[in-house]
Image (tube, rainbow, N blue to C red):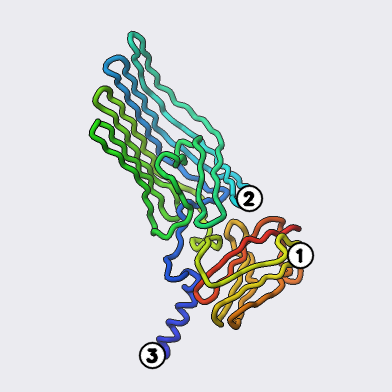
Amino acid sequence: MITNYSKFFAFFFLLVSPLLVLGQSPVYDMMPLHVGNTYTYQYYYSYTDNDMGYMLESDLDSGVVTLQIISNAINDSSIIWQVLEIDSLHSKGFSIFKNAGGYYDTFKVSQYTFDISEALTDSHKIGVNNNSLVWDFSAGLSSLFRYTQSGSRVCYSTKDDTTNGIGMSDSSIFAQDTGFCKRQYRFRRGLMELFIYRISITLSRFNNITAIEKQSPFLARESNLTLKNFPNPFNSSTIISYSIPTAGNVKIDLYDIMGSKIATLENRWCDAGNNTFRFDTGKQAINLATGIYIICLKAGGQMISKKINYLK
């Protein structure tokens, strides 16, 4: 019975060991990015300003904002994702300035594109420009990373309450495999003037959400492994060299830049120390397009990855 239990435990460890790195938790994809992904948000925005009777203004926008990732471009350090945004909003409001004023009530559909950048190092820092009504994280987030070990929901928040009537709170919530799903922002300024600003965004519907492996092969991790290749860039073949601190099974996989596994290049028992082998695309019948790929070494419950550049 003990022997069978030991065999079961060993088999279970082999299954989960790729997800264990020095005792760390699995890595979650908190901003799924894939060409074709579509996100639909309920959007609400309100603004009121009353400056001691000198001016009164109120605006309210509500409706649906749809985002679709339409393309990407890859370079040595990042992926640039192009996103199409379609805003279908009902806008109404009024303004009174001295003896003049006006009222509006309109429905408008508009669309435009913007870019977000994803770094190909560490936990993949995300950068979003300020053109989007929804994916603009510059207000409350100094560092937004695609991958995290924090669990299935991550909330970033800021809060500032002072004695002179200023109050501000901003929270953004990200959910595993759906990405950014909710934001609540409020700002109030009082005493001599009344100024209230509020925004609410909720992911109401999503389609075609596809995330790459939660345990991304791109993430840098501490390990006692080394992994190199020469030449790099290479044309038809390259020498891959690696070292492991203790004898054990070694597996080296090849991924594309999107995280999809292409092939297993090495899977065998190795002695401790340095090892090399030749990766030949022709002999191994692996058809690659010109571009950047990832080789990922797993051994002894540890992992290390390296970018390689293939020129056809």
State the image coordinates of residue 59 (x, y, percent, origin top left): 36, 25
Total labels drawn? 3
Give the spatial CA distance, label 1 vs label 2.
21 Å
What's the amino acid at mark 1? Answer: Ser
Secondary structure of the residue carrying tag 3 is helix
Q: Which of the two residues, 211 or 137, is positioned nearer the viewer here?
A: 137
For label 1, the residue is 236
Q: Residue at x 58, y 42 (%)?
A: 82
What residue would you read off at disc 2?
74
- On screen, 265 above or below 1? above
Residue 69, numbered circle? none
Mark 2 vs 3, N-terminal side:
3
User: Who comes first in sequence, dot 3 or dot 1?
Assistant: 3
Please name the residue shown 31% across and 18% down the image.
56
Query: Considering the image in quadrants, where does the C terminus appear?
Result: bottom right
Q: How busy is the neighbourhood of tag 1: few (under 14 within 10 Å), some, or many (20 plus)?
A: few
Q: Count residues near mark 3 (Cα–Cα under 10 Å), then give few for <14, some for 14-19, many for 20+.
A: few
